[in-house]
Image (cartoon, rainbow, N blue to C red):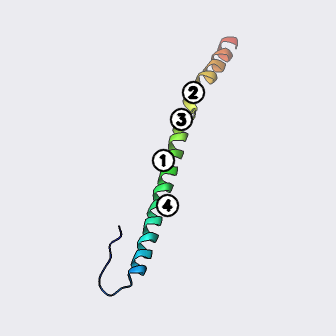
Amino acid sequence: MPRINHDGRNENTTLAAALIIDKERAERAAKTARLKEARLAQAITPGPSQRKPRVTKKVRRIFVAG
């Protein structure tokens, strides 16, 4: 429940402000979740370390043949 100040302000205005703040917090949380998900997806994709064995095989062939 939103806090209601009894300092003469309109309760509807206070409620509307609380709803806007809640919406902004939800949007921020969703954005953070999307960014975390994107970082995890990048971490799962194959990195350059998995491509190195192919390069070393080619280099070995060149040295053996040459």
Mark 2 / mark 4, whichever is N-terminal: 4
**57 up-or-down from 47: above or below:** above
Which of marks 4 and 3 precedes in the sequence? 4
State which tag comes first along the sequence, 2 or 1. 1
Disc number lying in front (2 or 1)? 1
Separation of residues labelled 3 and 2 (CA atoms): 12 Å
x, y percent for residue 19: 44, 70
- The mark closer to the camera, 3 or 2, is 3
The residue to which callout 2 is attached is 50
14 sits left or right of 45 in the view: left
Q: Amino acid at mark 1?
A: Lys
Secondary structure of residue under mark 1: helix
Quadrant housing the C terminus:
top right
Local crowd at mark 1 within 10 Å, few (<14), some, or many (≥20)?
few
Q: Dot 4, how many residues are within 10 Å of its Cα: few (below 14), some (14-19), or many (20+)? A: few
> Where is residue 12 shown, x and y percent of the image?
42, 80
- C-alpha separation, residue under disc 1 versus residue under disc 4: 14 Å
Q: CA distance from mark 3 to mark 4?
A: 26 Å
Q: Which residue is mark 1?
A: 36
Which amino acid is tagged 2?
Gln
Q: Quadrant of residue 49?
A: top right
Q: Earlier in the sequence, mark 1 or mark 4?
A: 4
Reading the image, the residue beneath label 4 is 27
Q: Which mark is residue 44?
A: 3
Question: Hey, what amino acid is under mark 3?
Answer: Ile
Q: How many marks?
A: 4
Q: Is residue 60 left or right of residue 28?
A: right
Q: Nearer the viewer, residue 31 or 48?
A: 31
Residue 24: x %, y % from top left = 47, 66
